[in-house]
Amino acid sequence: MHNLATRIGLMAKEAASSSSFGIEINTAADANWAQVADSLPEKVTINGKDYKTDDLSGSARKLLVIYLSDLRIVGQQKEMLALAELGLKALASEIQKNLPDA
C-alpha cells in the first residue's frame, strides 16, 4: 500500500510539474481521437439542444468523446463503490456473527 501511495504521489507531482496548469494534452493522440470521434452517434443532445455530430467542429467532437468516456468511467467507479459497500456490509455481518457473546 505504501508503494502505491508513493507512486501516485510521484505521478501527481510529475503531472503538476509538466504544465503550468497541471494539465497536459497529448497532441500526438489527435489522430486516435479523430478516429474514435467518427464512432459518435449521428445526433447528440447537448444542454437540451440537438446537434448533428457531423456539424460539430473537430474540437467539439473530440471533447464529446472525452466527456462520454469519462462519463462511462464515473459510472464504473460508482458501481465498484456500491459493490465495495455491499462487501463491507457482508463482512461486518460475518464479523458480528463470529464475535463471542457479550
Image: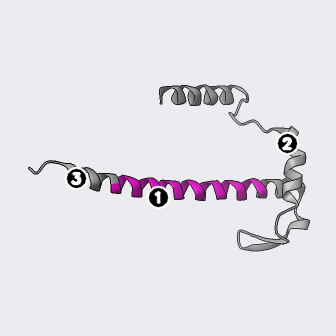
Helix, strand or loop for the magenta stretch, by majority: helix
User: Which residue is found at the position 54% from the left and 30% from the top?
Assistant: 4
Q: Give the magenta-colored segment's residue range.
A: 65-90
- Above or below residue 95? Residue 14 is above
Dot 1 crowding, Cα within 10 Å, few <14, some 14–19, many 20+: few
In the image, which is nearer the foreground, mark 3 or mark 1? 3
Numbered-mark total = 3
Dot 3 crowding, Cα within 10 Å, few <14, some 14–19, many 20+: few
Dot 2 crowding, Cα within 10 Å, few <14, some 14–19, many 20+: few
Residue 29 is tagged as: 2
Q: Amino acid at mark 1?
A: Ala
Give the residue pinned by disc 3: 96
Q: Picture quarter containing residue 54? A: bottom right
Does the magenta portion include 66? yes
x, y (%) of residue 47? Answer: 71, 68
Estimate the spatial distance between the alpha carbons at disc 2 and disc 1, rounded to whole Å: 33 Å
Estimate the spatial distance between the alpha carbons at disc 3 and disc 1, rounded to whole Å: 21 Å
Q: Amino acid at mark 3?
A: Gln
User: Which residue is found at the position 87% from the left and 38% from the top?
Assistant: 28
Give the residue pinned by disc 1: 82
